[in-house]
Image: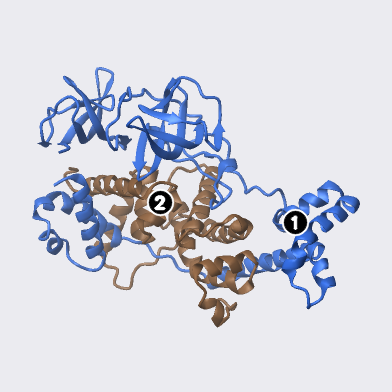
Chain colours: A brown, B blue
């Protein structure tokens, strides 16, 4: 339970206004940004690292990094979340290098992670999840990233383009190839 | 059915599947693409059904929020302190004088005083109030913690060249991105590849005008692997890329295809995960060559249109090596109308 709350006025701000207030170090603006984005950034960091503790630390760092860089940020119509994902991406890359581990998408429940089964999580669903995650790990890192952002984080192509610093068209093409490769891995005959 | 239309159908079906429609139901809308669409949609549905959940620990979240808001408060207080340096003329003026009237005079006066009393260091601090303020809060210098300098599979792309919207650390694209790439999107261009000519500067067969580039990093020579971002322009009916940013990349240049001397619309050469996708003019038919890459059509499942020298074609397939030469073993060839 988070105790900090924001004013009703802050809750009504547009993203552009929110950014301006954040640049002015408004307590309420940063409270709103944190409240709206914490869970999704945590989830992203966890998907990238597979380490819950590291994901929590990284998520905290993402917001401090955002505070540090907010004066450089220019709102261009892309949701603020895309910028935060970009920071999260960079921090997780640094973290993974330090940890010297390869997988960029770690979806195992090991290493302190707690994947929460759905309430109706049946055995076949668990098998499917395992198979999908296993197949995901066999894709290239860029393919993994685009699928995670698109299907797990539900970002638009434009938002993913902002995160990956690619054109939206390139993101679509990358997703196309990633899905094709994943489908091939998930198909029993491998075709 | 061209590939662009296929991608549109795929996106529409993906959205419908996300919204709960069954795959079969959606495929009835696009029977001509049903087989290929199904493979993509099965993968997408599997992904959607395997999304892992993570439990948010309230205490940890609270600590993180407190840490952030503490830093926000400190940054705000420090900025207010800095503001005192330039705010005094306004306070002296009182409420009856508009700030706009005093604004032209306030800065020079303040700077003169600061020069007299504080020296250049203080001036720099005032001109860039954010920097010392945040530096004081976070410690260290203003740059974000850099990614490790070793060039493993992901490396620093160029923190120093980050745009205003970018966070300070920039990771390089994956190694997959080391392949040559030419992308035109509207009036924007982005290329990665080796320099094949210096005068004029040519990358992936595209002429680069670097004369107005805001940023040129590294020493450019023949064969240097570079990344170019800029705007397209037509010069003598030829599309060129007017570079805004040109950067030498410290990447081992793989065996590069010979770029087309005169690229057709939307030329593209992409190799990814053992797959190849080419779009460009056919420069030879025996063997078929597109964007300098040899294409083996012997096992193609689909060939649309007549392949001939000069036509624009799109090839999708698998990348193989035949007698030491990289060849795109085509699964699908489409000749543009």
Q: Secondary structure at mark 1?
A: helix
Residue B104 at x, y percent in the picture: 75, 60
For residue A161, which numbered disc appears in the image?
2
| Residue at the image position 78 percent from the left and 74 percent from the top | B97
Q: CA distance from mark 2 to mark 1?
A: 34 Å
User: Quadrant location of residue B236?
Assistant: top left
Q: Quadrant of residue A139?
A: top left
**Mark 2 secondary-structure assignment:** helix
Q: Position of residue B7 (x, y in %)?
A: 23, 51
Horizontal and vertical percent position of residue A1: 54, 77
Mark sitting on residue B136: 1
A35 versus A43 height, above or below: below
Residue B321 x, y percent position in the rendering? 26, 24
Q: Nearer the viewer, mark 2 or mark 1?
A: 2
* Residue A108 appearing in the image: no
Residue located at (58% from left, 48% from top): B168
Chain bearing mark 2: A
Q: Nearer the viewer, residue B168 or A58?
A: B168
Q: Based on the displayed image, in which of its 4 quarters is residue B48 positioned?
A: bottom left
């Amino acid at each position: 339970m988070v105790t900090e709350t924001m004013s009703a006025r802050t809750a009504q701000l547009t993203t552009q206004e929110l950014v301006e207030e954040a640049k002015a170090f408004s307590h309420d603006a940063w409270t709103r940004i944190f409240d709206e984005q914490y869970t999704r950034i945590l989830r992203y960091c966890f998907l990238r690292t597979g380490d819950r503790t590291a994901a929590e630390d990284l998520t905290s760092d993402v917001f401090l990094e955002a505070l540090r860089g907010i004066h450089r940020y220019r709102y261009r119509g892309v949701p603020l979340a895309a910028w935060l994902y970009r920071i999260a991406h960079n921090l997780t890359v640094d973290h993974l290098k330090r940890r010297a581990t390869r997988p960029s998408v770690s979806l195992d429940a090991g290493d302190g992670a707690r994947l929460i089964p759905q309430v109706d999580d049946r055995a076949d669903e668990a098998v499917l999840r395992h198979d999908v995650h296993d197949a995901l790990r066999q894709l290239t890192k860029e393919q993994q990233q685009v699928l995670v952002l698109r299907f797990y984080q539900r970002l638009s192509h434009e938002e993913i383009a902002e995160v990956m610093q690619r054109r939206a068209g390139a993101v679509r093409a990358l997703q196309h190839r990633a899905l094709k490769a994943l489908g091939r891995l998930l198909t029993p005959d491998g075709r | 059915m061209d590939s662009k239309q296929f991608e549109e159908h795929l996106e529409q079906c993906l959205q419908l599947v996300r919204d709960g429609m069954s795959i079969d139901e959606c495929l009835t809308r696009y029977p001509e693409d049903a087989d290929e669409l199904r493979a993509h949609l099965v993968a997408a549905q599997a992904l959607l059904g395997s999304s892992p959940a993570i439990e948010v620990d309230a205490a940890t979240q609270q600590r993180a929020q407190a840490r952030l808001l503490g830093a926000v408060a400190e940054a705000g207080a420090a900025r207010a302190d800095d503001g005192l340096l330039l705010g005094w003329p306004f306070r002296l003026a009182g409420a009856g004088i508009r700030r706009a009237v005093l604004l032209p005079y306030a800065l020079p006066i303040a700077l003169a005083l600061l020069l007299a009393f504080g020296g250049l260091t203080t001036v720099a601090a005032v001109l860039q109030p954010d920097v010392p303020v945040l530096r004081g809060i976070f410690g260290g210098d203003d740059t974000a913690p850099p990614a490790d300098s070793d060039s493993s599979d992901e490396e620093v792309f160029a923190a120093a060249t980050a745009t205003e919207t970018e966070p300070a650390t920039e990771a390089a694209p994956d190694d997959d991105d080391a392949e040559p790439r030419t992308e035109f999107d509207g009036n924007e261009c982005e290329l990665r590849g080796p320099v094949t000519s210096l005068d004029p500067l040519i990358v992936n067969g595209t002429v680069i005008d670097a004369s107005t580039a805001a940023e040129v990093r590294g020493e450019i020579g023949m064969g240097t692997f570079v990344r170019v971002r800029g705007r397209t322009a037509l010069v003598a009916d030829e599309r060129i890329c007017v570079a805004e940013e040109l950067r030498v990349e410290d990447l081992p240049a793989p065996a590069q295809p010979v770029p087309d001397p005169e690229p057709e619309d939307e030329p593209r050469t992409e190799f990814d995960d053992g797959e190849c996708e080419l779009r460009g003019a056919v420069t030879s038919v025996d063997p078929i060559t597109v964007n300098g890459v040899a294409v083996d059509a012997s096992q193609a499942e689909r060939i649309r249109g007549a392949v001939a020298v000069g036509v624009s074609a799109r090839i999708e397939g698998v990348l193989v090596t035949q007698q030491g030469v990289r060849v795109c073993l085509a699964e699908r060839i489409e000749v543009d109308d």
